[in-house]
Amino acid sequence: MAKRSAPSSSNVASLADIQPVGAARAQPRLVELAGIGKRFRSGPVATVALADIDLAIGRGELVSITGPSGSGKSTLLAILALLDEPSEGAYRIDGVDTTTLSPSAVAALRNTRIGVIFQSFNLIGDLSVELNVELPLIYGGVPAAKRKQRVAEVLELVELSHLARRMPVQLSGGQQQRAAVARAIADDPPLLLADEPTGNLDSRHGDAVIGLLCALNAAGTTVCLVTHNPAYARMATRVVRLVDGRIVEDARS
Ligand SMILES: Nc1ncnc2c1ncn2[C@@H]1O[C@H](COP(=O)(O)OP(=O)(O)OP(=O)(O)O)[C@@H](O)[C@H]1O
Ligand SMILES: [Mg+2]
């Protein structure tokens, strides 16, 4: 798959300047979920987190996923990120059925295709901010000089250049979230999954992160954004709403 050029700080405009472009460019499916269900079992009790999920996302779409707490948004994102397996159903990326792949093939697919911004930041505690951001580039086999350049670039995008040498524990919640954003976008993945990426941010930094996701989308990245914020949800050209683990609305604007 061809790599796209990632945005630099100079072409990330303010939220108000950014026009969602996903629907206009939506192309054949990048991901396809068919009949996906997910049950969690603890002892005799099973929780149905997802049921009958059919969802196809085209290349270049910007999809927001909304719904009340406990409706299955994070579970859906974890399945899309290949971090959790569905209890039933099929998940294809680029036409490849992920359920038939070996664990190492799944890991390779995840490393090369998917960036994730978690609801809880999941930074590695004993690595500095810059090393956390560099990690996906090391996994991706990017040469050292290029890695340093890209790490500097993405840390500048999230306004964390001055904290590059700090350990995660020495950052505020919002700064950790921005470091997690930098790590997720470092290797310019074709599919970016973000679970409440603005949950710990003030409005200025929240707007900046959403602006960055929109700019990445404009440059070709397919983005799925879980958000409770109606203004951010409206930035997407498609809104998928979950209630009790089911899709109750899938609206394109
Ligand atoms: N590991 C788990 N074991 C058991 N139940 C789980 C597990 N993870 C999630 N659940 C349950 O699955 C359902 C969906 O959870 P999920 O985290 O996907 O919700 P969510 O929509 O992301 O909520 P929030 O907006 O609060 O983040 C909830 O009922 C939750 O309690
Ligand atoms: Mg969640």
Image: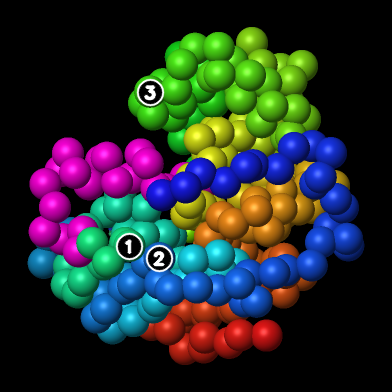
**Among the two numbered marks 2 and 1 on one chain, the one whose residue lies closer to the N terminus:** 2
Instruction: Identify the amino acid type marked 3.
Output: Gly
Quadrant in the rendering for residue 36: bottom left
**Taking 157 as reference, is 94 above or below it?**
below
**Taking 219 as reference, is 134 above or below it?**
above
**Taking 188 as reference, is 57 above or below it?**
below
Q: Mark 1 points at which residue?
A: 94
Q: Which percent across, then down, holds residue 180?
A: 57, 36
Quadrant location of the C terminus in the rendered image: bottom right
- State the extent of the magenta-drawn residues as a range: 97-119
Q: Which percent across, then down, holds residue 238?
A: 60, 78
Q: Which percent across, then down, holds residue 185?
A: 56, 40
Q: Do the residues labelled 2 and 1 touch (CB within 8 Å)?
A: yes
State the colouring used for the structure image: rainbow
Q: Are marks 2 and 3 in contact (CB under 8 Å)?
A: no
Out of 240 and 28, give the one closest to the viewer.
Answer: 28
**How far apart, in angstroms, are the residues tagged by discs 2 and 3?**
24 Å
- Is residue 98 one of those drawn in magenta? yes
**Among the two numbered marks 2 and 3 on one chain, the one whose residue lies closer to the N terminus:** 2
Instruction: Identify the amino acid type marked 1.
Output: Asp
Task: Say whether mark 3 is within 8 Å of ligand 2.
Answer: no
**How far apart, in angstroms, are the residues tagged by discs 1 and 3?**
22 Å
Q: Chief secondary structure of the magenta span?
A: helix
Asked whether the viewer can see residue 195, the reply is: no
**Among the two numbered marks 1 and 3 on one chain, the one whose residue lies closer to the N terminus:** 1
Q: Mark 3 points at which residue?
A: 141
Crowdedness near tag 3: few (<14), some (14–19) or many (≥20) residues, C-alpha within 10 Å: few
User: Could you tell me which residue is drawn at 47 percent across and 79 percent down?
Assistant: 242
Task: Say whether mark 1 is within 8 Å of ligand 1.
Answer: no
